[in-house]
Amino acid sequence: MDNFFLLVIAVLFILLAGFLIFYFQTQQSFQEITEKLEEIQHPHGSMLSSETLKRELALHHDKLVLLEADISKNKRESLLEEELKMFDVARHQIKASIAGLKSSGEWIGLPFEYEWTEMLDRLPNVLSLYRKAEADKRAKELEQDQGATPAN
């Protein structure tokens, strides 16, 4: 009788060991899949180094600061088409750089690094002229849409 119980316990122990091995290998596979998905969803953090991201962030921020200085110096009332495109590219690149720095854990934040909205607070002339240009563009699009649809 004692041998039977030992045999049952040994079989149960082997089954438990097999289950635990299967469980941990499955967890490891899930972890690898999760890491690959994270890499696919957030490629900026893995493709570019934090120094490169910081350099791009500073470069585009400097372009906007120079534009702000030019607008203040020359008292301009509008932005040129290239400046509007440069603003859009800078916004996209700055937001991507900030996201990459945050995902890599290299983002320090205030008072050393600014978010996009905090940068805009320090560029009032650029922001107001950009908003004015966008509002004018939308007004022209609305006029074209209204002109294209016949009045009933």
Image (tube, rainbow, N blue to C red):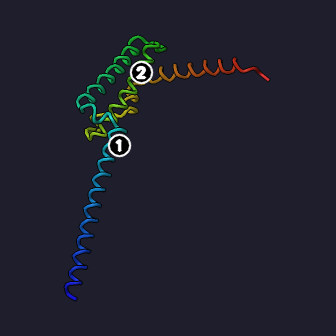
Q: Position of residue 52 (x, y in %)?
A: 25, 28
Secondary structure under badge 2? helix
Q: Quadrant of residue 138?
A: top right
Place of residue 74 in the rendered image (x, y in percent of width and height, measured from the top left): 41, 10
Q: Is residue 152 above or below residue 45?
A: above
The residue drawn where x is 43% and y is 21% is 126
SS label for mark 1: helix
Q: Which residue is mark 2?
A: 87
In front: 119, or 5? 5
Report whether 84 appears left or right of 5.
Answer: right
**Circle 2 residues within 10 Å: few <14, some 14–19, many ≥20:** many
In this view, 12 is above or below 38: below
Badge number at residue 118: none
In this rendering, position of residue 146 left or right of residue 113: right
Q: Which residue is mark 1?
A: 37
Residue drawn 55% across the image and 22% down it: 135
Q: Earlier in the sequence, mark 1 or mark 2?
A: 1
Q: Which is nearer the eye, 25 or 101?
A: 25
The part of the image, by quadrant, that contains residue 144 is top right
Q: Nearer the viewer, residue 117 or 3?
A: 3
Disc 2 marks a residue whose amino acid type is Phe
Residue appearing at x 38%, y 19% in the figure? 68
